[in-house]
Image (tube, helix red, strand yellow):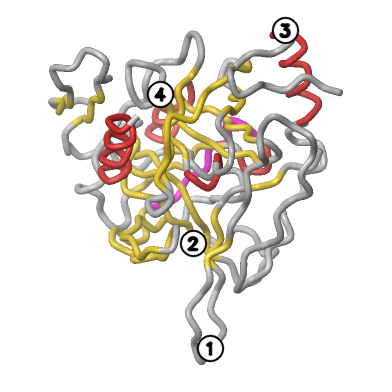
Amino acid sequence: MPTTPSSNGSSSGTTDWQATMARTWPGIGTPRGPDFNPGRKPPLPQREPSPESPATTSSIEPKPRTARAAPLLLAAVLAGGTTGGAIAWATTETAVPTIVQQDADPAPPGNQAGTESAAAAILPSVVQVRAGRGTGSGFVFDDRGQVITNHHVVEGVSQVGLQLADGRTVRASVVGSDEEEDIAVLQITGSAPDAAPLGTSRSLRIGQPVIAVGSPLGLSGTVTSGIVSAVDRTSRIGGAARPMVQTDASINPGNSGGPLVDLAGRVVGVNTAIATTSASAGNIGIGFAVPVDRALEVAREIIAQN
């Protein structure tokens, strides 16, 4: 039986564990998404003997309408097989991490060079999250190697595996999560990448170029580009209506928890859900991200409570 991380973080050996991860999550291979069922949550995957429960994938139930409404799906997947000043948040408690947000200076104009430099700035801080059979994305956001992802990516587990941008696989523990806000915080075990540059969502403009970074269908380090389609689109995530950033940057299953980034390379949102015309349609250019200002506020509360 393959070795898997235990709840106390131990295993029979780092090499065996990394090899097991490579076999369990083959990445590109022949990825298959879950059988989404519009209007209700899909059945839970068959539980296998494991020290952890597999993550689940949820759907968001559309309200009844006269016309057929597009399902809104959480962008998780079950894999087959600048400049300007800075605003620093800190407290006098030495155990609390420092989270730094850059101010609202405009991002560079939307051109190819801007997209490339933004990708180069953010990619080292982005991780693929492997929770049970589920995969998602996340990014390091503070100086203690803590990671923001979505609650629905890590729901039901206390330990996850992470694939870093340099190809290393490491473990992380779930510090805590907020189901209503669909935000979770992870703590990397051992050395961690530098924190991602953090921007602010309050200065986003409709039409502003952005990129989405994550691991759609297990393809880690994937970058897609688009624009901000709306800055205050109310969507029902985690059972509660919340204002979200809408984008047409391609977001697919596996992107959940990854960053939405402006062309200065600063995180402005946490990619969370997509709207589709059918359960299997995939991306149609309508994606939603939790505004980074709210995501960071929730992350701070999670850290303080744990």
Amino acid residing under circle 2: Ile
How far apart marks 4 and 1 lie (CA) works out to: 43 Å
How far apart marks 3 and 4 lie (CA) works out to: 24 Å
Along the horizontal axis of the image, is 90 left or right of 170?
A: left
Q: Which mark is residue 146?
A: 4
* Percent of width and height locating residue 99: 25, 25
> Which marked residue is nearer to the observer: mark 3 or mark 4?
3
Q: First in sequence: mark 4 or mark 1?
A: 1
Residue contact between numbered discs 1 and 3, judged by CB atoms under 8 Å: no
| SS class, disc 1 | loop
Along the horizontal axis of the image, is 195 left or right of 155?
A: left
Q: Residue at x 58, y 32 (%)?
A: 129
The residue that disc 3 covers is 13
| SS class, disc 2 | loop
Q: First in sequence: mark 1 or mark 3?
A: 3
Q: Which residues are magenta?
A: 219-227
Observer-nearest of 34 and 265: 34
Q: How many marks?
A: 4
Q: Which mark is residue 286?
A: 2
Residue contact between numbered discs 3 and 2, judged by CB atoms under 8 Å: no
Q: Residue at x 69, y 9 (%)?
A: 14
Residue situated furthest bottom in the rendering: 66
> Which marked residue is nearer to the observer: mark 1 or mark 3?
3
Q: Residue at x 73, y 42 (%)?
A: 79
Observer-nearest of 114 and 54: 54
Q: First in sequence: mark 3 or mark 4?
A: 3
Along the horizontal axis of the image, is 141 left or right of 64?
A: left
| Label 4 crowd bin: few (<14), some (14–19), many (20+), radius 10 Å | many
Position of 305 relative to 227 (above/below): above
Position of 97 relative to 44 (above/below): above
The residue that disc 1 covers is 67
Does the segment drawn in magenta span residue 224? Answer: yes
